Image: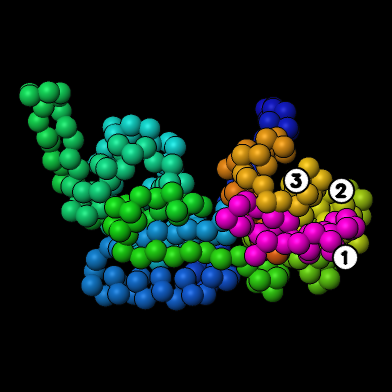
Amino acid sequence: MSKGPTNNKSEPRDATLDLTLRPQHWEEYVGQNHVKKNLRVLIDAAQKRGDCLEHVLLGGPAGLGKTSLAHLLAREMNTNIRITSGPAIERVGDLASVLTNLLPNDILFIDEVHRLNKLVEEILYPAMESRSLDIIIGKGPSARTLQIELPPFTLVAATTRVGLLSGPLRSRFGVSFRLDFYSVEDLEKILKRSANILKVEVRPNALRVISVSSRFTPRVANRLLKRARDYAEVYGDGTITEEVAQKTLGLLEIDDLGLEPMDRRILEVMIKKFNGGPVGLQALSAATAEEEDSITEVYEPYLMRLGFLERTPRGRVVTEYAYKHLDIKGSAQKPLLS
């Protein structure tokens, strides 16, 4: 019996592999120790009371483990997790369908919660606060409100843009945490575990090279590890050495600090077209042909973490460190805004 073309099965297999690389147990989750300690207290207290968790808001850049934490919370509480996202809940009816299908103590995980429709968000308030769903039936003088009681549940919401959340929504979360970038040492621990799952041998020096170039982000680290594995299988004996890691990064046009082509393009455009800044977001987006959200959510946080970019009241400014890294002369004569 034919199994069909191989290329049709590559994407589902890769997606399944990404899920496999996620930590399956609380002890396997590396980093974010402050967040983990606070959540551990929350979990233990809820279990002692025999109650569900309070609503949890997780913020921070993409790829730092917010979704993994939500899954681990469900595992630790021995309950089900229902997953959706802000853009997927377009209408009030969509949210009502999700909420009314929850079982007692279920965890509802909403990714990109900052992209919730405002009308949908208002329906979420009583659901979070009093475990009730208020639906308006009809219009005008004949309209009436139908109230549906909901079982106890926990909303775990994730966002990369905490500042875009409304005050009323933020205030309804029992706890709110921001996940920070990872250290190189923690990324090496994550990569060791991932290498064991992938059944690939990685030399310590190679782990260091990949970790340093991973933008302090586990998702990026795992992606680079998989690409290095591919390179080692095609051009080597399957072992990821320091040389294999460096050649993989070169093939992907990633430098020794993890800067990708678009990172360098943003900095170079600011230097060559705007004399290093200050430059506004709209102008930078137009000049680089990159969406504003991508600049603020994907590239800017890392460039600021490296100290290559600064935000000022007048706009974004390239720092002296970026000039030196890109080996662009003449930066010493350009004053930086404080």
| Relative image position of residue 234 (x, y in whole percent) | 88, 48
- Magenta range is 309-338
Q: Marks 3 and 1: in contact by CB < 8 Å?
A: no
Position of 202 with respect to 60 (left or right) is right
Identify which residue, 87 or 78, lies in the foreground: 87
In the figure, residue 70 lies in which quadrant? Answer: bottom left
In the picture of the structure, the residue carrying the numbered disc 2 is 251
What residue appears at the point 27 percent right and 43 percent down from the top-left corner?
122
Of 127 and 197, nearer the camera is 127
**Residue wearing tag 3:** 274
Residue 185 on image: x %, y %:
69, 74
Q: Position of residue 87 (x, y in %)?
A: 44, 37
Mark 1 or 2 closer to N-term? Answer: 1
Q: Residue at x 47, y 72 (%)?
A: 36
Q: What residue is at 7 percent from the left and 23 percent from the top?
A: 142
Rendered image quadrant of residue 213: bottom right
Amino acid type, callout 1 = Glu
Mark-to-mark CA distance, 2 and 3: 30 Å
Secondary element at image label 3: helix
Name the front one of labels 2 and 3. 3
Foreground of the two, 18 or 36? 36
Instruction: Name the disc covering residue 242, or none.
Output: 1
